[in-house]
Image (cartoon, helix red, strand yellow):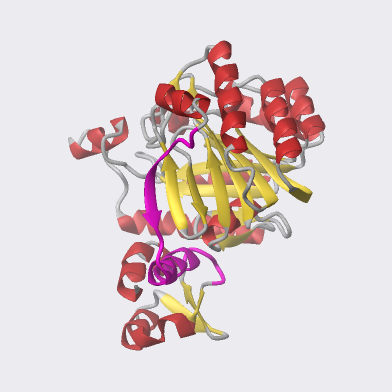
Amino acid sequence: MLRGIYIHIPFCSEKCPYCDFVSIVEENSDIHKEYINSILKEIDLYIEEDFSVKSIYFGGGTPSLLKPDLIAFLVENIFKKVRINNRPEITVEVNPENYRFADFKILKEAGINRISIGSQSFLEKNLKALGRKHSPEDVLKTVDSAFKAGIENINLDMIYGITGQSLSDLEKDLKAYISLPVKHISAYMLTAYENTPLGIEVEKGRYLLPEDSIILDMFKMIDEYLEQNGFCRYEISNWAQKGYQCRHNLLYWEGEQFLGLGVSAWSYLNGVRFGNTNNLRLYSKIVNEGKKPAVFFEKITPEERRKESIFLGLRLSKGIDLDIVKDKMPFIEQIVNEGLAQVKDGRLILTEEGILVSNYISSMLI
């Protein structure tokens, strides 16, 4: 049963130096309209599937580069085409410089009830280091506009581990974040992905990332500060007030089935993971011919599914059932003794120190 729909909006006004997602610099509204029509044609190709959708997520790219009535048009037509649960979570990612009150009002009336704002930081020097064009004031205006339009479920993104960032800088950011009427905060460590402008700068030694010990101190500060201010960490990079965990992301981490629509979107359905072409023109051509645009396929065996449940489950604050890794008890005892994990109520849970080496721990358990 399909529980979620992800819609990839690849368009951006420019490419951020740290981003490794598929994105296209394109602001032409006519091309945006053509793309939305292609997405509606794509979903028609999956009408025979069993839908019971509890979340729809617009990611990017920059979904807020689209006019809000275009997003509203797409949501309205999705509701007509597939079975949607009562009160689904519908999220749109937004850049702080794009939407204001009238735009959010259109989204609210269309059923969008969650906004994720790519704020990243409230410090000008951090925004400059990240190549972001918005200002801290833009973030404040965006949060205020969304809230006044009736969208109360708001997430703010934060990036830490930026060159030159101190713990004092991070504390200033945290104070700014929790002062706003937001329900969810996502904090991501800056990562230098291969072949991104940032990755190339790091490889050449022109951009220095903080040492692991500093990253650990930053993570601990974030976790403790947010916990003290009513936000509970439920996943490695995500904190929420009670009842406001992101349903869509939980859907991924808990292994439920979902459909990805649009360029480069991935899906998991009937034991198969498949991904659409990364090429915009090819995507539109294939869909307009009445064919599914998936070009990458991977059959997930029960054993692979078990391994993935370990990797994904360890990201969650509730951890994993100890029974599924009971054959790894010597290693589990080792990481518990090293302070990287704890066993509680029959579950293996990573500590703050363990979170920073979670990929290593997962690889040893699978």
- Quadrant of the image for the C terminus? bottom left
Q: Position of residue 273 (x, y in %)?
A: 44, 53
- Quadrant of the image for the N terminus? bottom right
244 shown above or below 35: below
Picture quarter containing residue 117?
Answer: top right
Q: Give the residues drawn in magenta, as a range.
A: 291-318
Q: Residue sitting at 43 percent across and 76 percent down?
A: 341
217 shown above or below 262: below
Depth check: give the residue in front, 70 or 279.
Answer: 279
Depth check: give the residue in front, 337 or 292.
Answer: 292
- The question of residue 116 being in magenta is answered with no
Q: Position of residue 228 (x, y in %)?
A: 64, 61
306 shown above or below 234: below
Outermost residue toward the left in this view:
204
Q: Position of residue 224 (x, y in %)?
A: 56, 61
- The question of residue 313 being in magenta is answered with yes
Q: Residue sitting at 50 percent across and 29 percent down?
A: 287
Q: Residue sitting at 23 percent across and 34 percent down?
A: 200
Left or right for 361, reference 280: left
Depth check: give the residue in front, 44 or 203.
Answer: 44
* Residue 246 in view in this figure: no
Q: How many marks?
A: 0
Depth check: give the residue in front, 196 or 339.
Answer: 196
Left or right for 72, reference 168: right
Picture quarter containing residue 356?
Answer: bottom left
Left or right for 308, reference 150: left
* Residue 138 in view in this figure: yes
